[in-house]
């Protein structure tokens, strides 16, 4: 598996997590994710 993928933010503020990453991490619709901002 690649170490990173490129995706984009929609006009509605949504980010699509690529399918291969969701499958590798066993993420399903409705799962909660934490977002951390590093500066």
Image (cartoon, rainbow, N blue to C red):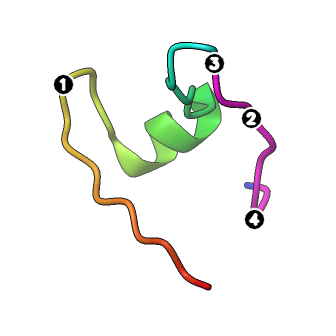
Q: Secondary structure at mark 3?
A: loop
Q: Position of residue 18 (x, y in %)?
A: 63, 31
> How would you classify the magenta stretch by its main secondary structure?
loop
Instruction: Give whichever of discs 3 and 4 has the lower sequence position.
Output: 4
Name the front one of labels 2 and 4: 2
Residue 29 image point, x, y percent: 27, 21
Q: Earlier in the sequence, mark 1 or mark 3?
A: 3
- Residue behind mark 3: 10
CA–CA distance in space, label 1 to label 3: 18 Å
Can you tell which of label 3 and label 2 is closer to the viewer?
3
Regarding mark 1 in the picture, which secondary structure is present there? loop
For mark 4, does the 10 Å Cα neighbourhood hold few (<14), some (14 to 19), or many (20 or more) residues? few
Q: What residue span does the magenta drawing correspond to?
A: 2-10
CA neighbours of label 2 inside 10 A, class few (<14), some (14 to 19), many (20+): few
Which residue, given by chain and number where applicable, does mark 4 sit on?
3
> Where does label 2 land, which residue?
7
Count residues near mark 1 (Cα–Cα under 10 Å), then give few for <14, some for 14-19, many for 20+: few
Q: Which mark is in front, 1 or 3?
A: 3
Q: CA–CA distance between discs 3 and 2?
A: 10 Å
CA separation in Å, label 3 and label 4: 23 Å
Q: Residue beneath label 1, please?
A: 30
């Amino acid at each position: 598996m690649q170490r990173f993928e490129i995706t984009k933010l929609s006009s509605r503020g949504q980010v699509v997590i690529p399918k291969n990453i969701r499958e590798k991490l066993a993420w399903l619709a409705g799962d909660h994710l934490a977002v951390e901002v590093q500066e």
